Amino acid sequence: MTAAPEPRRPGSGREVTRSIGQVLTALTQEFPDVSISKIRFLESEGLITPQRAPSGYRRYAEHDVERLRYVLSVQREHYLPLKVIREHLEMMDRGQTPPEPKTLESGSTATSTTSAPVAPTPTAPPAAPKKALRLSRQDLLEASGLSEAGLVELERTGIVVPRRGGSFYGRDALTLAIAARRLGEYGIDGRHLRAFKMSADREVGLVEQAIAPYVRRAGGNTDVSGEVTQLVISFHAALVRTAMER
């Protein structure tokens, strides 16, 4: 299996830039599954940082396209997770050569350049939390691919809302907007999404009532709510997957 190409780094001089549609056209032949929402997702994860034109739209330089090509290649050929890909890109930005990915038979991956035993290394510090997104309405429309009418409908039903006390949207709003647009392609429209929202509201009410004594006992510690939220999300996702597999 051939190694993934290394993305070129920005050079000097004025660079020719492309729109996201032109980038999609440049990548589609090599990566048929790539989409605008995929490119925007990789940007939201900090793997590419396109420029902003005076009009506010994103413009992609050649090094952005090469980074995308690298990311898509190692995802397809080596199944590398985004965390590892991000580390590789950071090494490239520092002028270093990342280890060559090696795909294992189990489908997991390792990054190794030798078959000799590797000495144990100290445990890496926990990954830094993702940088909070702060999207304007136009940013959200552009990043999600939603139409204005589609966003209005999601806001009307309370599915997508700005951050509390502001007019900007966060990461969850982007996730919901992208998912709503994609679900619409499969005939899952606003009527279905409202049902999902009502179901989620009922779940939240049930959970809040159940954990209230524990939250009071912890002095309002948000760690309790955060932990239970993650457990409920995992439980709910497993229930849906199990039901769909029947």
Image (cartoon, rainbow, N blue to C red):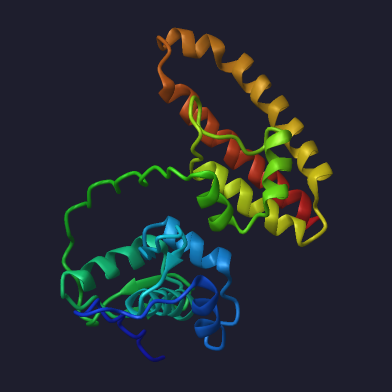
Q: Residue furthest bottom?
A: 2
Name which residue lies at 28% across and 69% down: 89
Whether 220 is drawn above or below 66: the answer is above
Q: Quadrant of residue 46?
A: bottom left
Q: Quadrant of residue 91?
A: bottom left
Q: Is residue 175 left or right of residue 17?
A: right
Name which residue lies at 30% across and 82% down: 6
Whether 62 is drawn above or below 145: the answer is below
Name which residue lies at 75% across and 32% down: 199
Report x, y in % for residue 147: 68, 54
Counting every numbered tag in the picture gives 0
Report x, y in % for residue 87: 28, 64
Q: Is residue 228 left or right of residue 181?
A: left
Name which residue lies at 23% across and 47% down: 125
In the image shown, does 3 or 57 lie closer to the viewer?
57
In the image shown, does 60 or 37 lie closer to the viewer?
60
In the image shown, does 3 or 64 lie closer to the viewer?
64
Q: Is residue 149 left or right of residue 93?
A: right
Report x, y in % for residue 79: 46, 72
- Which image quarter is the C terminus in? bottom right
- Which image quarter is the N terminus in? bottom left
Q: Is residue 229 left or right of residue 122?
A: right
Q: Quadrant of residue 233?
A: top right
Q: Residue furthest front?
A: 54
In the image shown, does 58 or 29 lie closer to the viewer?
58
